[in-house]
Amino acid sequence: MDKSWMSLGRLSKEYDDGVNAFLEFAQSNNPKSDVIPCPCVNCINLRPGSITSVRFHLFANGFDENYTVWSFHGEGSPKVKVRCPDESRLPEFDYTKEMLHDAFAYVEKEPDSLKSLLEECDKPLYEGSKHNALSGLMIFQKLKGQFGWSDTSFNALLGALKTVLPAKNTIPSSMYEAKKLLKGIGLEYEKIHACENDCVLFWNEHKDASECPTCGTSRWKKNTKNVPRKVLWYFPPIPRFRRMFSSPEIAHDLT
């Protein structure tokens, strides 16, 4: 696998394609979870993160060029067996505020967004809870990806938790409210079904198609009901580049 892109400029098409290929590789080796070790130069696989946050780190900080064998992400090694860090053994610490400061550190034009999110971090999920609405939601979001919960089931779960948890809890009551909160920190993405042979994407004029108009391959897996053979994770680029180029220093580093 060609990894020369890791040392290229972060605005180049090769680097963007390489990051996409890496994330697809990591996701294919751990399909039940949206969380992987982050190989950026700051995290160096010591901190796990969602697919979206890892992608942001790889563009904001760069890919660790010494990480040439992706052993933490499923690439085999003939001599050493390396496992992903066991999150259950990591010391308990709420990284939510630190993550927000990292994401907004260079964004002088969005102080209100950061202030609003930090205020959410200061509100406990419920009285006596060590989690806030944002950190709690990220835990539930991780479980959603890990076990393949649908948006409908996740929406029902949030509604039930809102009722079951103590009064005046701050957990979002619906999937819509959850997405608004996650969108504030850039954790937004769109899943688009794709032809298994990479012919077309099932969107726009093909969004209702059951098979590929080019090669005829079924959109769905065999013996399943509406389970796609292949899914593309689309990360809207405008918010990411708007944040990156709001800082003259980062804009200079990325060129």
Image: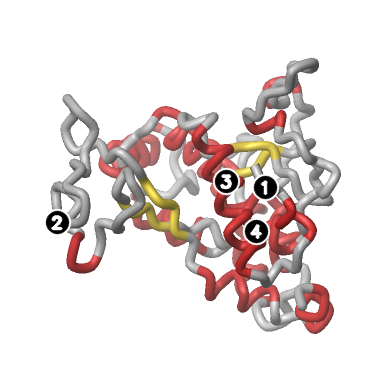
Q: Closer to us: mark 3 or mark 4?
A: 3
Write down the residue under mark 2: 208
The amino acid beneath tag 4 is Phe
The amino acid beneath tag 1 is Asp
Badges 3 and 2: C-beta atoms under 8 Å apart? no
Task: Give whichever of 70, 95 is nearer the camera.
Answer: 70
Residue at the image point whose x is 56% and y is 49% from the top? 21
**Residue 2 rendering spot, x and y as whole percentages:** 67, 47
Labels 3 and 2: the sequence-earlier one: 3
Write down the residue under mark 3: 23
Residue count near mark 4 (Cα–Cα under 10 Å), binned few <14, some 14–19, many ≥20? many
Spatial separation of the CA atoms under disc 4 and disc 2? 31 Å
Q: The residue tagged with tag 4: helix, strand or loop?
A: helix
The amino acid beneath tag 3 is Leu
Spatial separation of the CA atoms under disc 1 and disc 3? 14 Å
Observer able to see residue 192: yes
Query: In this image, 245 relative to 41: left or right?
Result: left
The amino acid beneath tag 2 is Asp
Write down the residue under mark 4: 56
